Amino acid sequence: MKKSLFFLIATLACLTTYAQPLSKDSLYFVRLLNGTTLYSNKVQLIRSRNSYLLLDNNQKIPLSEAKEFKGWDGAFAIGNPNGFFDAYRLDHEGRRISLYSQCYSTTETVFASTTPGGPQIPTTYSTQQKDWYFRKDPDGTILRLNFRNLKYAMADNPASTHELQVGRTNVYLGIGLMVTGVVFSFAGILQGVHRSQDAQNAYKTASNNWFNAAQANPFNPPPMPPLPPHYGPSALFYLGLPTMLSGMIPLFNAGKHAKKALDIYNGID
């Protein structure tokens, strides 16, 4: 949830001007950890067990030796926040903190039959997801975008830290309101169900008593008991709904405060 609350800005470092036989006017490049910049007419990211960059279809650069690169689909930074080296696309550019993302898809296959006892037909569903990361300054490392990492990165700017803390408080407040609303709504539904069950049980008892009385005096039976009422959710349900919806307000504001914290840190605000 926290990952989707940020609207952000960021920066990719200026690259060194070292030239290989190709001209610096080449569209694409790879910057190595040793400061060397390799220019190329084509840069491909090849993902495998040992991922690497392929320059002009003939030169391989292991990701562990590269810092950043620019290819036909954008600028990327290399990092290993997840325990292995990978490429992260620059999404928002800022003066101090840059935001990066990584898109991936998950697939799930469900087997179901259209008729009872019929053959199971597989259906595959794909879901596109996006993870966010950031990098502080040109020589910084790629880190996951969350409040904890941003707090450490912005520790040298009290104004940004304050905005970030306000945003974090809003997240906790929003989650608390939504959880409270769900609990109230569920309790309201349960109370309504229990009242209906109690009324049904009372009706069954009254019906049995009426039947016994009618059997004892068939010529002058007592009046039949009224049908049991059906109770809907109690007032807690109607209190829980607005409480749950109100939790969206601080969650939305959390993203605004996080964005302001980044703007302040990047010198925009």
Image (tube, grey):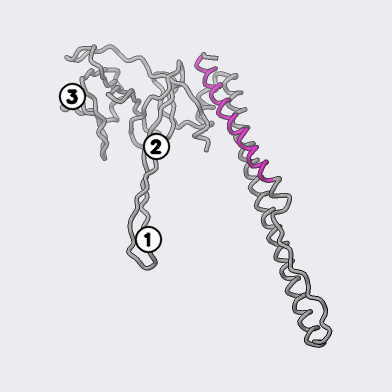
Residue receiving disc 3: 56
**Nearest the camera: 258 or 160?**
258
Q: What whole-number distance in Å separates the C-alpha atoms at marks 2 and 1?
A: 42 Å
SS category of the residue bearing label 1? loop
Q: What whole-number distance in Å separates the C-alpha atoms at marks 1 and 3?
A: 51 Å
Give the residue type that dot 2 points to.
Asn
Which of the two discs, 2 and 1, sits closer to the camera? Answer: 1
Determine whether 170 is above or below 25 in the image.
below
- Rendering quarter of residue 92: top left
Indicate which disc residue 114 carries: 1
At 40% from the left edge and 25% from the top edge, which residue is drawn? Answer: 91
- Rendering quarter of residue 208: bottom right
Describe residue 201's horizontal placement relative to residue 95 as left or right: right
Residue 246 pos. (x, y %): 65, 37
Is 262 magenta? The answer is yes
Determine whether 43 is above or below 201 in the image.
above
Indicate which disc residue 82 carries: 2
Q: Which residues are magenta?
A: 240-267
